[in-house]
Amino acid sequence: MNRACDTQNNHHPSFSQAHCANSSRMPLFGQILAALYQDDIVDEDDIRRWHARPASKGEGWKPSPETEGIMKCWLIGSHMIKQFDEQESDEDDDTGSE
């Protein structure tokens, strides 16, 4: 099971998200996620599935510092999803102009 972006458990954030949300290293979450992606440890579909899960957004969690950190990690992931979408759009534009 890919624990870095655990998409099997819909009731809890991923291992890396939960760890970063409770750590002084939370600002590194985007870099960690990007490194996992660039090193082919997780792929785009894994990240999209993680990002779409309600628990990854902090839904269903009581307000707390941990929930706030989880939501910040999710927001960081949103930037990566936006980059994926922009790359797909650019690729579609490139193939359409040939």
Image: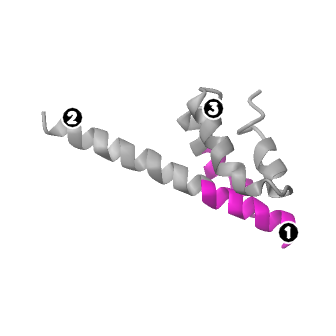
Dot label at residue 42: 3
* For residue 87, above or below residue 98: below
Mark 3 → mark 2, Cα distance in angstroms:
26 Å
Q: How far across and down, in percent of the image, does residue 10 sit? A: 76, 47
Residue at 29%, 38% in the rendered image: 91
Dot label at residue 65: 1
Residue type for callout 3: Val
User: Reading the chain from its start, which is encountered first: label 3 or label 2?
Assistant: 3
Residue type for callout 2: Thr
The residue pinned by badge 2 equals 95
Confirm whether the magenta stretch covers residue 93: no
Mark 1 → mark 3, Cα distance in angstroms:
27 Å
* For residue 83, above or below residue 35: below
Asked whether residue 14 is in view, the answer is: no
Asked whether residue 56 is in view, the answer is: yes
Q: Secondary structure at mark 2?
A: helix
